[in-house]
Amino acid sequence: MSVLNDMTPKQLHAKAVEALNHQNIKQAHAYLVQLVKLVPDHADGYFLLAMVNINVGQLVKASKLIEKALSFNDLIEYRAHLAKCYALMGKLTQAKSCIEKVDVKNISKALTADTIGVVLSRIGLHERAIVFFQQAIKIDSSNADYFYNFGVSSKFLGDLQQARIAYEKAIAINPMQVAAHFALSGLGQITSQSNHIDRLLTLKRQPLNADEQLYIGHALAKEYEEINDYDQAFYSLLYAKKAKSKQVGSTRSRDKKMFNQLYQYIDSGRLEQKKGVVDDSPIFIVGMPRTGTTVVERMLTRHEEVHSAGELHDFPLLTKQLSEENSPHLLNDDVLRAAERINYELLGKTYIQKAKSVANCPSKFVDKLPLNVLYTQLILTALPNAKIICLEREPLDTIMSNFRQLFASNYSLYHHSLDINDLCRFYMQFKKLISIYQNKYPNNFIKISYERLVESPRVVGEEVFNFCDLSWQDDYALIENNHRPVDTASAIQVRQPIVSSNIGNWKHYKNHLEEIKNSLLTENYNLNK
């Protein structure tokens, strides 16, 4: 401590920066605490303290420290990182307000430009985001992450060739940029003569951590699928998920407790006495992922009165926040039990404000987070006039499409997808739950068959629009004419006409699904032969 007491503020600041650059978080913290003690209005001292807190996952404390830094010096760099904190906490409205007036021409640091781009991308504002990624690359063309982020927004905006070039540039700079390898495999134009399999196999032989295995294994699976080698694709999926599945453990017991708590709420009616907010604007599209939710969203948002809010995490995050439950999981039986003490009027009001800010609309908006289906009763308690459209797909197609999908590994609600048997059990519980909801809430909750949707899009589309009290036009089914950005795994498919060719895709993997088929048949599920 005597050494710190002998240092000047300038020396403390320099030492703190050096310590942070070397990931010596504890030492950096000591320097910075001494710095702001000596100079209570040292803006950069508070900002760097925020960086320390971000490093240890203390986002709330970090955001307050950056707010204090901004009170002394309103720098774009500070605003960028405050917006990042807000975005990571799911506070997208605040994130947007932090940076909406920032002029990209005033940014001189590549990291600041990239940070703002990432926040805008997370909000779904890809047309704005891409300008900031371009600025980051202009300032520093040696950073693989900047090219990767530029590629992601290019893909969501429909410029696949620009995305492909950006991903290849990221890989050239850093061959271990595993996210770029995975993203590149999803852009198509892969043949038996032109693919990235050898390059991916070389990476697979490297010592990879669990998250890197997820990316490389899924990339290999996608490329093997494209050349019709479905056995190798399946083996690649098993490889991809093995280490991460072992790391997080089986979800079966946790999922069962969560669903049982949902059933208890339905049976008891305990939430029915709660008061919510009467508002006709929200439309929720829910279901298992990869079952046509984006197709329905693209139809709905062709209507001039309907805007997309994307896949918002606001309702789950607000539920967790207002429940005051300290569980490490966003949703489990503990959070659901605590949901009884939520002020549902406040939940509904706050959610509407946030969603409308993101969707940038005064009228109806679509929230397309698939697993909001688990919040159905909470949604209809907080927002009794909400419309909920639930997609369902043939069992084996649903299970395989989810097993083939790479979900965010830090989002525990999707951990069941790491093990195909856990995934099968989750699907069975999902099917039971949505049947109960359809019977309980016939005016608010509708089930839509994926197979009917893609085979008769105009017929099913009109049913959906009538359910939402919207006027229908046949050309709304032409989703390829919807030119708004798409920030989901279906970004490429939904820029093309609706097709039914994905029905029965599970059959490519039938040699590996006997155990799953038997589990489904035992529970009397009808399977597409």
Image: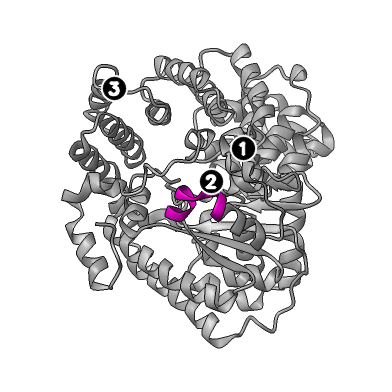
Of pointers 3 and 2, the one earlier in the residue sequence: 3
Of pointers 1 and 2, the one earlier in the residue sequence: 1
Q: Nearer the viewer, mark 1 or mark 3?
A: 3
Secondary element under disc 1, as helix, strand or loop, is helix
Q: Residue at x 68, y 51 (%)?
A: 472
Q: Residue at x 53, y 38 (%)?
A: 25
What type is the residue that disc 1 sits on? Met
Place of residue 502 in the rendered image (x, y in percent of width and height, measured from the top left): 37, 44
The residue range painted magenta reads 450-459
Of pointers 1 and 3, the one earlier in the residue sequence: 1
Q: Is residue 457 magenta?
A: yes
Q: Which residue is mark 2?
A: 295
Q: Nearer the viewer, mark 3 or mark 2?
A: 2
Q: Quadrant of the N terminus?
A: top right
Q: Which residue is mark 3?
A: 191
Indicate the quadrant where residue 226 lies.
top left
Secondary element under disc 3, as helix, strand or loop, is loop
> Is the C-beta separation of discs 1 and 2 under 8 Å?
no
Q: Which residue is mark 1?
A: 51
Q: Quadrant of the C terminus?
A: bottom left
Q: Which mark is residue 21?
A: none
> Is the C-beta separation of discs 3 and 2 under 8 Å?
no
Per the picture, the main secondary structure of the magenta-coloured stretch is: helix
Instruction: Give the alpha-carbon distance from disc 3 to disc 2, as whole Å.
Output: 27 Å
Place of residue 446 in the rendered image (x, y in percent of width and height, measured from the top left): 56, 66
What is the crowding at mark 1: few (fewer than 14 residues within 10 Å), some, or many (at least 20)? many
Q: Nearer the viewer, mark 1 or mark 2?
A: 2
Indicate the quadrant where residue 480 lies.
top right
171 w.r.t. 9: above or below = above
